[in-house]
Image (cartoon, helix red, strand yellow):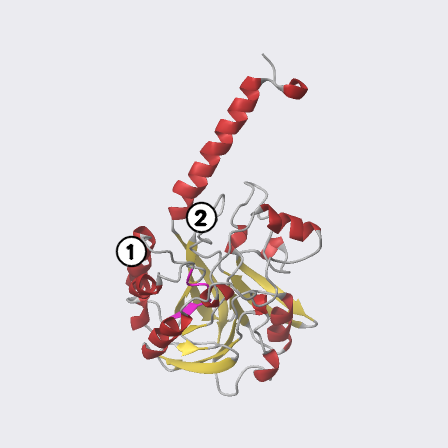
Amino acid sequence: MRARYGVPLKVTAVGAAVGVAGLAYAAGFEARSFRLRRVTVPVLPHGARPLRVLQVSDIHMVSGQGKKRAWLQSLAGLRPDFVVNTGDNLSDPEAVPELLDALGPLMEFPGVYVFGSNDYYGPKLRNPARYLLEKARGKHGLNGNAPAVGVVHNPWEPMRDAFDEAGWLNLSNTRGRLKLDGLEVAFTGLDDPHIKRDRYAEVQGGPETGADLSIGVVHAPYLRSLDAFTADGYPLILAGHTHGGQLCIPFYGALVTNCDLDTDRVKGLSSHTVGDRRAYLHVSAGCGTNRYTPVRFACPPEVTLLTLTPKA
């Protein structure tokens, strides 16, 4: 017997089985196959000792994610010099206690943070194909504005208060400094450009005088933010948001970034150039997913340990 249009039923059944198996792998295994990425970035002054920076991003904690919680807790064993949290910690308004439990050991170290849209607002159920459709229409991402009335507001204030109490610096459209073993590291942060909360005019002016290193921090790596940081002379920018493309094609890579960043720089270390100025850019692929699309394919969840070393 043959299916309509001459496609054998056996082929159709095999294709469906492969699709189901792939989805099961993406949701059941790869989305829980946590990895540590290691990167070296030469941005420190000559003679400085290396600094180890743990960047965590896009945790998207959902209640009951015990394996993720235990893995995040274990990262304290890396003994970083400081932690950078680039946002989207939540995907469930009930998960704040579990998130803080997961990050508790890391909050014993110095740290800084910015928030992403999913820290402020709960996710919505959407057809994942819309990401591709929006890209085809020349648009970037599915938000671009603050969510409309009726969208669930996440309880971000207790999360902020816990981070602040631990001594982590809130970099939402502001600056901050950490003194680390004799080095002054300055930070300039933005609130999330994905929902147009970034206010670069409030922090413009470039690296601070007297700092040994200045770092730009933002959740979503929209080009307007990267351009501003780079033009102002920041040597290093840290971001998240993209999930590394989340559903990638083996040997090809990401199809979307959910912002206007090109797919070649969807995750990992690259660079950004404006005129004659160049900055290192590190985009974390993150370690979670939206609760309504709990799958990753050819893009395992990750955090990054960046070792900052003296310039060549």
Q: Amino acid at mark 2?
A: Pro
Q: Which mark is residue 70?
A: 1
Label 1 secondary element: helix
Q: Quadrant of residue 274?
A: bottom right
Task: Tell me which label, 1 or 2, sits earlier in the chain.
Answer: 1
Q: Which mark is residue 49?
A: none
Q: Amino acid at mark 1?
A: Ala
Residue 66 position in % (x across, y down): 30, 53
283 over 206 or under it: above or below: above
Label 2 secondary element: loop
15 over 285 or under it: above or below: above
Q: Please identify the quadrant where the N terminus is shown.
A: top right
The foreground one among 222 and 89 is 89
The magenta span reads 82-90
Residue drawn at 61 percent across, 69 percent down: 226
Report whether 166 appears left or right of 172.
left
Q: Is residue 243 magenta?
A: no
Report whether 48 appears left or right of 135.
left
Q: Quadrant of residue 176?
A: bottom left
Q: Is residue 88 magenta?
A: yes
Mark 1–mark 2 Cα distance, whole angstroms, equals 18 Å
Residue 280 position in % (x across, y down): 56, 67
Q: Which mark is residue 294?
A: 2
The foreground one among 283 and 201 is 201
- Determine crowd level at label 1: few under 14, some 14-19, many 20+ residues with C-alpha closer than 10 A: few
Q: Residue furthest top?
A: 1
